[in-house]
Image (cartoon, grey):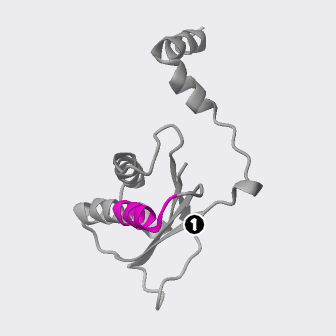
Amino acid sequence: MPHITIEHSANVGVHHDIAALVGAVHAAALEHALAPSDGLRTRAVGRDHYRVADGHPDHAFIAITVRIGPGRDAAAKSSFLETVLNAAEACIAAEGGPLAVAWSAELTEIDEMFRINRNHVRTRIQAGPVAQAEVDSQDQR
């Protein structure tokens, strides 16, 4: 945990590298103390059907949603959200382009009573590189 979803209007993908955006946000989240590496998941989803403001084709949106487990204080949550949003904006700004982007970022806590988590990635990481090498060799057969 956390889970980060970057929702964007389709025109963002026309002018910007979405994989680079996901990478920048994921890297920033990893650098922040809130995010354990084995639980972090970052993904992007484009929206083909959208309208921003007056509908001009150069208007775009990027909405970042962060979902985390409970127990962090308000300062940590605010800092994490700011870090993620800053990384996303910096990535898009660095690429330039014609779009005026409406940004939003929101963080919500998941109610642990209504969540099931089975993280096999954590088990693999804890097993270390020997276990990964064994899996890789089996995949090549």
Q: Which residues are magenta?
A: 72-84
Q: Residue at x 43, y 51 (%)?
A: 34
Q: Position of residue 10 (x, y in %)?
A: 49, 67
Element under disc 1 = strand
Prevailing secondary structure of the magenta residues: helix
Q: Which residue is mark 1?
A: 108
Q: Residue at x 48, y 18 (%)?
A: 128
In magenta stretch: residue 74: yes
Task: Specify the quadrant that holds the C terminus.
Answer: top right
**Which quadrant would residue 86 be assigned to in this image?**
bottom left
Q: As displayed, is residue 78 above or below residue 23?
A: below
Q: As displayed, is residue 34 above or below residue 99?
A: above
In magenta stretch: residue 133: no
Which of the pair 125/7 is nearer the observer?
125
**Which quadrant would residue 13 be assigned to in this image?**
bottom left
The extreme bottom residue here reads 54
Q: Position of residue 47 (x, y in %)?
A: 56, 67
Amino acid identity at mark 1: Thr
Q: Position of residue 72 (x, y in %)?
A: 50, 59
Q: As displayed, is residue 138 above or below residue 101?
A: above
